[in-house]
Image (cartoon, helix red, strand yellow):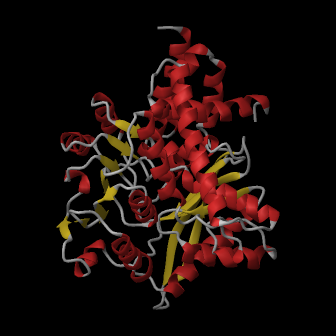
Amino acid sequence: MSATADKIASVRASIVRRDPEQKEFLQAVDEVFESLAPVFEKDPKYLEAFERLVEPERQIVFRVPWIDDNGVQQVNRGFRVQMSSALGPYKGGLRFHPTVNLSVIKFLAFEQTFQDSLTTLMMGAGKGGSDFDPRGRSDREVMAFCQSFMTELHRHIGADTDVPAGDINVGAREIGYLFGQYKRLANNFTGVLTGKDLRWGGSLIRPEATGYGCVYFAQNYLAHKGESLKGKRCVVSGSGNVAQYTAEKLLQLGAVPITFSDSNGYVLEPNGFTQEQIDHVMELKNVKRVRISEYCAFSETAQYFPGKKPWEVSADLAFPSATQNEIDEEDAKQLVANGVKGVFEGANMPSTNEAIEVYKSASVMFGPAKAANAGGVAVSGLEMAQNSQRLQWTREEVDAQLERIMKDIFDNSLAAAQKYSLKDDIQAGANIAGFLKVADAMIQQGCV
């Protein structure tokens, strides 16, 4: 074993020793570590940068007390992990979900570091959230929680320090309440959050950006293989913002989206969803906030499969757009057996490392989350630019920028893979390209 290999093993052991219980974070680190081995072997200085990068610059954990509609006190836990400011202000979403804990937020912040770097925009990386579940809560309860959450968080963020955005269960309603409380406490109107309403500083295309961007990424990968999206049957998981706009853009580009899902099961449209049907899914999930099974009352052709995942459906492409680790090894084997030739991740780390190995063994095209779902944070960066200019760009301008950024991410990931003799391993290429930009900035800025 070489001296560099010994050092790699030592760094890996120290990461595990420091946080042995943080399984999601360690999974994310392992996935990147393996990809970066050729970089460390070629130039060991980058291993020292990685050793610093895996330790967040700041981890903030705080109490969030609030009163529900029955006058009863509730207490949740809030988090903000400020991972890296090497390339700009911390940037990344807030997630409100019962599964949120420090390990989940750290993994998301770590992934965000590479993703934000890949966009080519001047953004650092962070992530935050709470174990609060807004489902089933009244608007007044959600407002009470958001105001309490921001009362603590506001002292740690700012337009040039840390700019949060939405994530799972943090949409337009939550961003509005959070921004209102920040403005009240800070006594200024500034672009401290992205994903805002268009009437007070938001950007066109922002709600669509993650889903649209994922499809643009897939389009570039398919073009590299001499193929197109036209006529491809696509299984989409989830039914939130990312899944909705993934399906919409797939339809616009000639593909056939055939599923949506939630934690209770999935719905299948055998002939593909129409725009009218996608609009109805949006109404069910964004306005009525009900389960995806309710869709079947709208469509005579829909089939609902309770307790099942959409990966059992035969298709050409898969777009996991729900949550982390939704595809395990057995799911991946099922996808391959059903004829899927490409998996493009709209959610954050939806495939386990074992599932990724199945994709690679079967030569399935794989668009990893840090590259394929970077559209959301890319347009967040464009929203920050518009806020700084006190301007709002047209829909066409933002969409063109998004399409260009996603092409650049694919091209840069492919080039990095080929530079290190990894052919068209886009997963490794994305890790390498994202890491090198951050690592070079860290080295130039000194041991801080």
Residue that sits furthest to the top in the current view: 2
Identity of the residue drawn at 77% across and 67% down: 391
Residue 38 placement (x, y as % from top left): 52, 19
Identity of the residue drawn at 51% across and 70% down: 76
Q: Horizontally, is 27 left or right of 235 in the view?
A: right
Q: Horizontally, is 1 left or right of 262 in the view?
A: right
Residue 366, by quadrant, is top left
Q: Horizontally, is 23 left or right of 329 in the view?
A: right
Identity of the residue drawn at 27% across and 78% down: 294
Above or below, comparing residue 378 to residue 33 in the picture: below
Residue 118 placement (x, y as % from top left): 60, 41
Q: Horizontally, is 404 left or right of 1 in the view?
A: right
Q: Is residue 351 visible?
A: yes
Residue that sits furthest to the bottom in the current view: 70
Q: Quadrant of the C terminus?
A: top right
Above or below, comparing residue 39 to residue 305 in the picture: above
Residue 232 placement (x, y as % from top left): 31, 50
Q: Is residue 82 visible?
A: no
Residue 243, by quadrant, is bottom left
Q: Nearer the viewer, residue 328 or 419?
A: 419
Q: Nearer the viewer, residue 295 or 99?
A: 295
Above or below, comparing residue 394 to residue 48 in the picture: below
Q: Nearer the viewer, residue 28 or 102?
A: 28
Residue 412 placement (x, y as % from top left): 58, 33
